[in-house]
């Protein structure tokens, strides 16, 4: 079945520490991959995307993600977390010919000051 | 440029009622998708429209319907509301099918 798995439901990091959020996908072909962020009560904001080419992609707010085909992963990283990064993060990919996004269950990030 | 806009922002209905949610896409975007996000879960795909035609439908009952207008705005309709329909309803727009989707702020629906 086509799916996205985010193994970590909650993650807590100290401000200034590095961050890695995990995402694994199950899909028969090369997917189009996305990371979105959702602040409480808000919609989803696109952080970055991978369609093809360079497997390390840069996004907004200092985030980056690396596509690893051999591991079916698309992990999100940030070298130094800011308190304003506290939010819920969703990994997603296109399925069905690109007419819908399939989302993971999300990772809630808490930042300790 | 304005992003995706949705109305209303919040809505309270009772079981059995009908609701209409509205979405205006980013200017120039011709595709609109609808998602339902239940508390504590990721968004679930409901519909996608492109050039006023339905191009995808998720696993939702026939009580859910949608349409896209000539100006590419869209409505999501839900009939015979159930308590389980309480959720954040997100609209996303994209230039075309297979393109990056940009989300609006959502409409939070509470069914009592």
Image (cartoon, coloured by chain):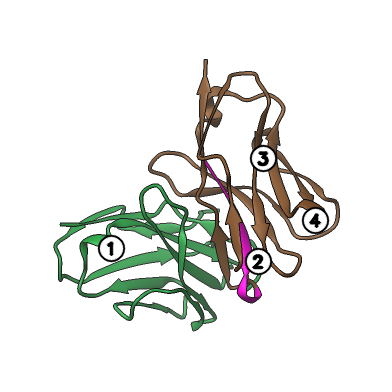
Chain colours: A brown, B green
Classify residue B15 as left or right of residue A85.
left
Asked if one can make out residue A63 in the rendered structure from this viewpoint, the answer is no
The residue that appears at 49% across and 64% down in the rendered structure is B25
Nearer to the camera, A25 or B77: A25
Q: Residue at x 77, y 50 (%)?
A: A67
Q: Which residue is mark 1?
A: B85
Q: CA distance from mark 4 to mark 3?
A: 23 Å
Foreground label between 1 and 4: 4
Report how far apart the C-alphas of labels 1 and 3 lie in the structure. Answer: 33 Å
Give the residue displayed 72% in from the left and 27% down from the top. Answer: A79
Check if mark 1 and mark 4 are on a common chain.
Answer: no
The magenta span reads A88-97
The answer to whether residue A60 is magenta is no
Query: Given the image, what chain letter belongs to the residue carrying mark 4?
Result: A
Q: Is residue A56 visible?
A: yes
Q: Which residue is under mark 3?
A: A60
């Amino acid at each position: 079945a086509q799916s996205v798995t985010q193994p970590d439901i909650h993650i807590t990091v100290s401000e200034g520490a590095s961050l890695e959020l995990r995402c694994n996908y199950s899909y028969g072909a090369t997917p189009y991959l996305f990371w979105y962020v959702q602040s409480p009560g808000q919609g989803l904001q696109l952080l970055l995307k991978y369609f093809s080419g360079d497997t390390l992609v840069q996004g907004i707010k200092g985030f980056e993600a690396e596509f690893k085909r051999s591991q079916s992963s698309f992990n999100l990283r940030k070298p130094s977390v800011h308190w304003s990064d506290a939010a819920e993060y969703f990994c997603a990919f296109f399925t069905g010919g690109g007419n819908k996004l399939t989302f993971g269950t999300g990772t809630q990030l808490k930042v300790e000051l | 440029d304005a992003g995706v806009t949705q109305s209303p922002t919040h809505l309270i209905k009772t079981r059995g009622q009908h609701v209409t949610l509205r979405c205006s896409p980013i200017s120039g975007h011709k595709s609109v998708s609808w998602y339902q996000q239940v508390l504590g879960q990721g968004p679930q795909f409901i519909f996608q429209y492109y050039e006023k035609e339905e191009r995808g439908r998720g696993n939702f009952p026939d009580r859910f319907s949608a349409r896209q207008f000539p100006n590419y705005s869209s409505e999501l309709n839900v009939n015979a509301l159930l308590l389980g329909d309480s959720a954040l309803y997100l609209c996303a727009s994209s230039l075309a099918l297979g393109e990056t989707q940009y989300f609006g702020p959502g409409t939070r629906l509470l069914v009592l």
